[in-house]
């Protein structure tokens, strides 16, 4: 069945360093992978997505990498800032317009 | 442009009581979704509506019903609330195009005692 999970539940980084958040998925048929950011008390906020026919996509300070060979997705945040503190979820979708979410990784920024 | 609006933001129910969570979007999206999020967990899909007039079960539909009232509104009903339904409920809307544009509401925190 569909399963999206995360390698690490928590991640602490120094302000200014780069952050890498990882995600494993199991559904080879998924055609989109999405990263969401959820701040405390708020709903998830779309960050970036990537289609299954791509292996890299860049946004503002964020890069998503997709490795279909090992079914691995990562989110890289450059020059991490205090405002990046949040829980990050990966999600996959394929058919019927449904999103399946992973457990989430809490990113903490140390000053 | 409000995006996705959920009401109420907080609710406490007694076991066996019923209530309806309201959701409205103003982005002309075809698809709408209801998710629940339990502490330390990801979001699990309860029900979704791919277009006006259609609804389908998600991963955890038991104990819930939904109504797609029109293109803008998608409500979630708990007929007989149970403590296991204590959770944060999120409504989302989206479309399927060059990029997925799922937008989430701010959530309804429900406690069943």
Image (cartoon, coloured by chain):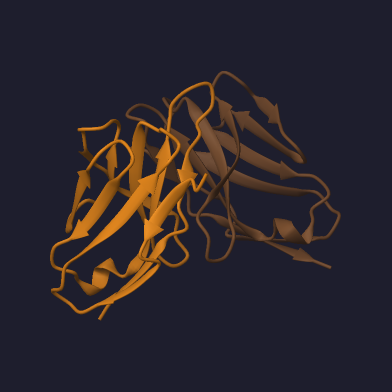
Which residue is pictured at 45% across the width and 55% down the height? B42
A11 or A84: nearer the eye?
A84
Q: Quadrant of residue B55?
A: top left
Q: Where does residue B95 sit, x and y in percent of width and height?
A: 43, 30
Within the image, what quadrant is residue A107 found in?
Answer: bottom right
- The single residue placed furthest to the front in the displayed view is B1
Q: Is residue B100 visible?
A: yes
The chain whose colour is orange is B
Residue at coordinates 24% horizontally, 74% vertically from top-left? B83
Note whether A97 is above or below A15 in the view shown. above
Instruction: Residue A49: give x, y in percent of width and height.
Output: 58, 33
Side of B77 where A4 appears, left or right:
right
**Letter of the chain in brown:** A
In the image: residue A11, left or right of residue B4: right
B109 w.r.t. B66: above or below:
below
Q: Quadrant of the N terminus of chain A?
A: top left
Against A106, is B59 above or below? Answer: above
Residue ID at (66%, 32%)? A65
Q: Is residue B92 left or right of residue A55?
A: left
Q: Nearer the viewer, residue A4 or A81?
A: A81
Image quadrant where one finds the C terminus of chain A: bottom right
Give B66 or A62, whichever is nearer the viewer.
Answer: B66
Residue A68 makes an appearance in the image? no
Where is residue B22? Give x, y as percent: 30, 55
Q: Quadrant of residue A58?
A: top right
């Amino acid at each position: 069945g569909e399963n999206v999970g995360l390698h690490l539940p928590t991640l602490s980084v120094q302000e200014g360093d780069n952050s890498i958040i990882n995600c494993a998925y199991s559904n080879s048929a998924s055609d989109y992978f999405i990263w969401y950011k959820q701040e405390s008390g708020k709903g998830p906020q779309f960050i970036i997505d990537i289609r299954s026919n791509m292996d890299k996509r860049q946004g503002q300070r964020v890069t998503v990498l997709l490795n279909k060979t090992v079914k691995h997705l990562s989110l890289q945040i450059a020059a991490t800032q205090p405002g990046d503190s949040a829980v990050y979820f990966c999600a996959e979708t394929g058919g019927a317009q449904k999103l399946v979410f992973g457990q989430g990784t809490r990113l903490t920024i140390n000053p | 442009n409000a995006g996705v609006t959920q009401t109420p933001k907080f609710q406490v129910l007694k076991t066996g009581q019923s209530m309806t969570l309201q959701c409205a979007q103003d982005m002309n999206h075809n698809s709408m979704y209801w998710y629940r999020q339990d502490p330390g967990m990801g979001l699990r899909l309860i029900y979704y509506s791919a277009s006006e007039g259609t609804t389908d079960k998600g991963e955890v539909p038991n104990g819930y019903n939904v109504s797609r009232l029109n293109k803008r509104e998608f409500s979630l009903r708990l007929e007989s609330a149970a403590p296991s339904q204590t959770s944060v409920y999120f409504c989302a809307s989206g479309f399927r195009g060059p990029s997925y544009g799922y937008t989430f509401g701010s959530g309804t925190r429900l406690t069943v005692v």
